[in-house]
Image (cartoon, rainbow, N blue to C red):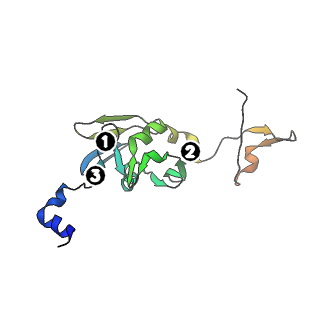
Amino acid sequence: MLRRTFLVSTGAAALSPAAPSASATVLYGERSVTLDKIQPDPKDLWVRKADLKKINDFEVKPQGACREDFCMPIPKEMVKGEWFNLTGFARKIGEAVVADSDTRVWSFGEIPVLRGGFLGSRIAPDFAVPDRTGRIVHLNDFRGKKALVVTWASW
């Protein structure tokens, strides 16, 4: 008899480590999302990467956590296999989090970096700086083109 068949037939498979089965409810904006699986952790909420889109419209990509064309780089410790540390991400971006561990309800506030008007229009405000020859250059001169702006300050 194969080991797997033996374990299933004797019920011993129930004793082997299985995927986490804890559930939680996540409140975000006007959404209330019930997750059937979370990874148990005493201080952080780990959700499946596949659930992230229905929670807050983000998805994990090689560039980081992305929402439409906006991406936030994330540290490798924030992702473990199929799991994503949602509360760690919230702390990184300055988002408010309130949790009730008894009822497994997590409430996330507005994401500060997304509420700015410039992200709504995706247009950076115009500014003027001298180039290396002293000629004044305006950001608006490059509208419709990709531009890399490198800055430095002595303070």
* Residue at far left of view: 10
The residue depicted at 17 percent of the width and 57 percent of the height is 14
Of circles 2 and 1, the one toward us is 1
**150 on left or right of 95:** right
Question: Contact, CB < 8 Å: mark 2 with mark 1?
Answer: no
> Looking at the image, which is closer to me, 20 or 134?
20
Number of residues whose C-alpha sits closer than 10 Å to that of mark 2, classed few (under 14), some (14–19) or many (20 or more): few
* Residue at far bottom of view: 1
Question: Contact, CB < 8 Å: mark 3 with mark 2?
Answer: no
Q: Amino acid at mark 3?
A: Lys
Rendered location of residue 133, percent (x, y): 87, 41
> Looking at the image, which is closer to me, 76 or 155?
76
Pick the quarter of the image with the C terminus.
top right
Give the CA distance from mark 2 to mark 1: 33 Å
The residue wearing badge 1 is: 41
Q: Is residue 96 above or below residue 50?
A: above
The residue wearing badge 2 is: 119
The local secondary structure at tag 3 comes to strand
The local secondary structure at tag 1 comes to loop
Of circles 3 and 2, the one toward us is 3
Q: Amino acid at mark 2?
A: Leu
Give the CA distance from mark 3 to mark 1: 12 Å
